[in-house]
Amino acid sequence: MDIFKLGDKILALLEMVFGFWNSQVSLVFSMLGQSPVSFKGGGPWAMVESVQPVFVAVGASLVVLFFVIGFCSESVDIREEMRFEVILRMLIRLILAEWLVANNVTIMKAFFATIGNLVNVLSAGSYTTVSIDAVQADVIKNLGFGESLVMLILAALLSVIVLICGFFMLYTVYFRFIKLIVIAPVGSIAFSTLAGNRNVANTAGAYAKYFLSVVFEAVTMALAIMVCNAFISAGLPSFTGNYADWVKTLIYLCEMTFTVALTVGSVKGAQSLTSRALGL
């Protein structure tokens, strides 16, 4: 009897769940291609620009302090150490530090625009959307009552996992924006350390590396989603040749669930992967 055939309902549930996943992926790509300057209508970034003059003032004051620290550490004996090249190097550090303190936000905006354009190029109709394979869909439609009951339990579990993964992926992308917006004004203080000696200037280097890893994280996230979606849509695994059709479909759905979770893990670890790949 048709009342005991759950195949159409299972298929409808799976199509709804993967439709949700595709909409989340589309939303994530649109956010990764967006600059923090225009995020949420520009409201959060307006707050950054309102407090930026305070950090610039503090950073400009610290430049003088760190310059004195650097001068004292490099001039143990003024008659022997204060050669022309030493003085020139110190002045170059001072000028570079002052320029970065005053213009670090402008430089950040250029990086935001560049990375956003790169993500938009990568996602311009080239990523694969997730859908149920037509052969597996026919198997699900023609399942008997016992097999369809098992499939329904698995589909319900898969739906919960995909929903959680979709929201968690969105949370990770939102958290990236928060990180960029929070660390942006602090750059004026970090770059002021360039006026000091080599040990003090390590702070500016560490800040620059962290900033670049968070910015380029968007490209790694986009690539991870594209690759994992291609895995999901690749069809049945090669080791399912000797199983019954409904068991093959079970394995197929399990692999899709595993790959969705793998996608979220790749997105979550994108910053660490970017830092290691680029040596940041």
Image (cartoon, rainbow, N blue to C red):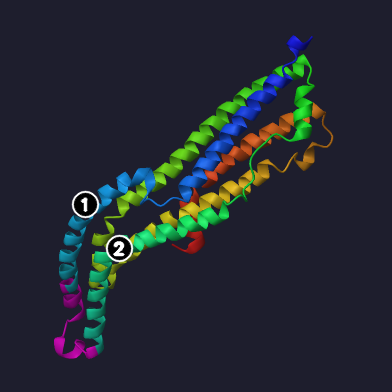
Residue 112 screen position, x and y as percent? 41, 57
Callout 2 crowding tier (Cα within 10 Å): few <14, some 14–19, many ≥20: some
Image point (51%, 60%), residue name: 277
Residue 62 screen position, x and y as percent? 17, 65
Q: For residue 8, which quarter of the picture?
A: top right
Read off the residue under disc 2: 104
Q: Is residue 95 above or below residue 125?
A: below
- Of 163 and 241, nearer the camera is 163
Q: Which residues are magenta?
A: 68-84
Most extreme residue toward the right is 242
Amino acid beneath label 1: Val
Residue 73 screen position, x and y as percent? 19, 76
The numbered mark, 2 or 1, whose residue comes first in the sequence reads 1
Callout 1 crowding tier (Cα within 10 Å): few <14, some 14–19, many ≥20: few
- Of 271 and 141, nearer the camera is 141
Q: Tell me if residue 80 is in the magenta stretch.
A: yes
Read off the residue under disc 1: 51
What secondary structure is the magenta-colored segment mainly? helix
Q: Is residue 273 above or below residue 66?
A: above
Tell me the element at label 2: helix
Amino acid beneath label 2: Asn
Image point (22%, 75%), residue name: 94
Q: Is residue 213 visible?
A: no
Q: Quadrant of the C terminus?
A: bottom left
Residue 138 screen position, x and y as percent? 78, 28
Q: Is residue 65 above or below residue 16?
A: below
Tell me the element at label 1: helix
- Of 128 and 237, nearer the camera is 128
Q: Quadrant of the N terminus?
A: top right
